[in-house]
Amino acid sequence: MLLAKLKVKEDKVAEYLEIADKTDKAVEDDEPEVQYKIFKTKLGNSRV
């Protein structure tokens, strides 16, 4: 299990999401048996 909490500067959100997508795909390729994964983001007061 991997849990991580990150703070991303507002001007780096797009870059972070791109890196998160690449990381997610790499884990999926390496560990296809993973059944549950989620990236949650909190931007300002809204949740994406």
Image: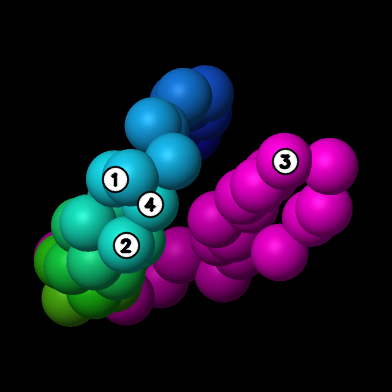
- The correct choice, above or below, for 22 with respect to 6 in the image is below
- The correct choice, above or below, for 47 with respect to 32 in the image is above
State the colouring used for the structure image.
rainbow
* Residue at the front extreme, as displayed: 11
Q: Main secondary structure of the magenta part?
A: loop
Distance from Cα at disc 1 to Cα at disc 3: 14 Å
Residue 34, horizontal then vertical, whole percent: 45, 65
Q: Which mark is residue 44?
A: 3
Q: Which mark is residue 14?
A: 2
- Disc 3 is placed on an element classified as loop
Query: Local crowd at mark 3 within 10 Å, few (<14), some, or many (≥20)?
Result: few
At label 4, which amino acid type do we have?
Answer: Val
Determine contact: label 2, label 4, CB under 8 Å: yes
Which image quadrant: the C terminus?
bottom right
At label 2, which amino acid type do we have?
Answer: Ala
Distance from Cα at disc 3 to Cα at disc 4: 12 Å
Determine contact: label 1, label 4, CB under 8 Å: yes
- Disc 4 is placed on an element classified as helix
Query: Local crowd at mark 2 within 10 Å, few (<14), some, or many (≥20)?
Result: few
Determine contact: label 2, label 1, CB under 8 Å: yes
Relative to 24, 48 lies left or right: right
Query: Local crowd at mark 4 within 10 Å, few (<14), some, or many (≥20)?
Result: some
- The correct choice, above or below, for 23 with respect to 11 in the image is below
Residue where numbered disc 1 is placed? 12
Magenta stretch, residue numbers: 30-48
